[in-house]
Image: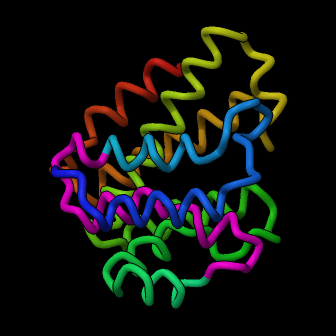
Amino acid sequence: MIFTQNIQRAIEFAEQVHRDQMRKGKKMAYIEHPLAVGLILARAGAEEEIVIAGILHDTIEDSDGRITKQDIEQEFGSRVAEMVSDVTEQDKSLPWEERKRLAREHVAEMSKDSLLVKSGDVVHNLTEIGIDLEREGGKIFERFNAPKEEQLEVYTKLVGAIASAWHENPLLQDLRAALERLR
């Protein structure tokens, strides 16, 4: 993957959306997460639009309604907008368990492009949790909406759903390894 002007535009767009956000319970700028997802996707050999969708994957969900699928489509095209929308939790007012169940069930309906974006997101989330767990111990789960056991169960089911939906997913080995390290 070659760094392109479109990828730079996506980084700038995501940086504006996430400007004042921090990673949950951490002193880390939120933008680090979508940039890491974009890097994971690029290293997996993803096309430019998939990398862009990875960089933008949380812009709708985490913008408090400021950014819509139509905004993404206008700036980056319908394919990118569809992938971003596909990985976006549709109703953040629902309880955590319900949101995660619906997101997991939606995996079976996703295109391979969207599954790759979702996989990059999950790989980074699991990897970051694993690193934080090694550094800080089990207290890191106090910043989440559920304890470690429930988090592990949700991620185990999600990785299983992704694996079932796409057996040839180039990030499947990374997903399984990151999940196993977390256990």
- Residue 96 vertical position relative to residue 24 in the rendered view, above or below: below
What residue is drawn where x is 39% and y is 72%?
A: 83
Q: Nearer the viewer, residue 143 or 2?
A: 2
In this rendering, would 120 be left or right of 142?
Answer: left
**Colour treatment of the image:** rainbow
Q: Nearer the viewer, residue 14 or 143?
A: 14
Magenta-span inclusion, residue 42: yes
Residue 149 occupies quadrant: top right
Q: Position of residue 29 (x, y in %)?
A: 67, 40
Residue 152 occupies quadrant: top right
Residue at the limit of the structure toward the front, as seen here: 5
In this rendering, would 70 be left or right of 54?
Answer: right
Q: Position of residue 45 (x, y in %)?
A: 16, 48
What residue is drawn where x is 36% and y is 75%?
A: 80
Q: Is residue 42 visible?
A: yes
What residue is drawn where x is 60% and y is 9%?
A: 134
Magenta residues, start to end: 41-67
Q: Nearer the viewer, residue 56 or 169?
A: 56
- Residue 18 vertical position relative to residue 67 in the rendered view, above or below: above
Q: Is residue 115 visible?
A: no
Q: Position of residue 7 (x, y in %)?
A: 33, 60
Q: Position of residue 119 (x, y in %)?
A: 38, 49
